[in-house]
Amino acid sequence: MVNREKIEQAVRLLLEGIGEDVCREGLRQTPERIARMYEELFGGLDETPRTYLEKTFPACGSQMVVEKDISFYSVCEHHLMPFYGKAHVAYLPQGKVVGLSKLARTVEVFARRPQIQEQLTAQIADALMEHLLASGVMVMLEAEHLCMTMRGVKKPGSKTVTTAVRGAFATDDRLQRQFFSMVK
């Protein structure tokens, strides 16, 4: 649960720390705006993927289901700077499927937490395996990290790609190749 009052205090201290006047017109409401923004950005801390993945529908077969190009925005826990990109998610159902929007909502639950991309990728895969009882899951995230593009090494446009494979995807190269051909 986000504590707006603490965030507002912290923002005031931060602004003072960089030499700003927290009373000047342009900054007076900034602590409140930042607190509201953080409540939105970190809303995933109060959510569970179960909420979205518990409602399933019967389905014949076990063909791969792929949802690709799911936009996501997250915040790097090391620098508290955004990283953003696309998630590609696949699973092999075992007699039941979930609504397609629920895959995007699962990505969103984990993305809206202070996070590292490697962990985000694994959390999505693990949640799908656990809640869908799928025979396999594969997740790939492609993201640009502002901590790398606007500070430090300053390499705009560079992308970090992470994957997580579970179940049948971990043992069947053919499934992995099929996934990669579908998301490219």
Image (cartoon, rainbow, N blue to C red):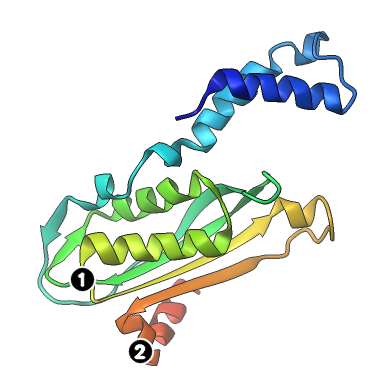
User: Which amino acid type is shown beneath numbered disc 2?
Assistant: Thr
Give the farthest residue toward the right.
19
Q: Nearer the viewer, residue 141 or 182?
A: 141
Q: Name the residue under label 2.
A: 171
Image height of 3 relative to 112, above or below: above
Residue holding disc 1: 93
Instruction: Check disc 1 and give the amino acid type.
Output: Pro
Q: Is the N terminus in the top left, top right, bottom left or bottom right quadrant?
A: top left
- Are there few (<14), some (14-19), or many (20+) residues within 10 Å of tag 1? many
The answer to whether any part of residue 55 appears in the image is yes
- Where residue 57 appears, as percent x and y from the top left, is 12, 57
| In this picture, residue 149 sits left or right of residue 173 | right
Q: How far apart are marks 2 and 1 (CA)?
A: 16 Å
The circle drawn on residue 80 is none
Residue 22 lies in quadrant? top right
Name the quadrant containing residue 33: top right
Which element is circle 2 on? Answer: helix
Horizontal placement of 117 versus 30: left or right?
A: left
What residue is at 44 percent from the left and 50 percent from the top? 110
Task: Say if mark 2 contacts mark 1, CB within 8 Å.
Answer: no
Q: Is residue 174 above or below residue 113?
A: below
Q: Where is residue 183 in the image (x, y as percent from the top left)?
A: 46, 72
Q: Which residue is pictured at 55% across the width and 65% down the height? A: 118
Where disc 1 sits, the SS reads loop
142 or 36, nearer to the observer:
36
On the picture, is 117 further left or further right than 68?
right
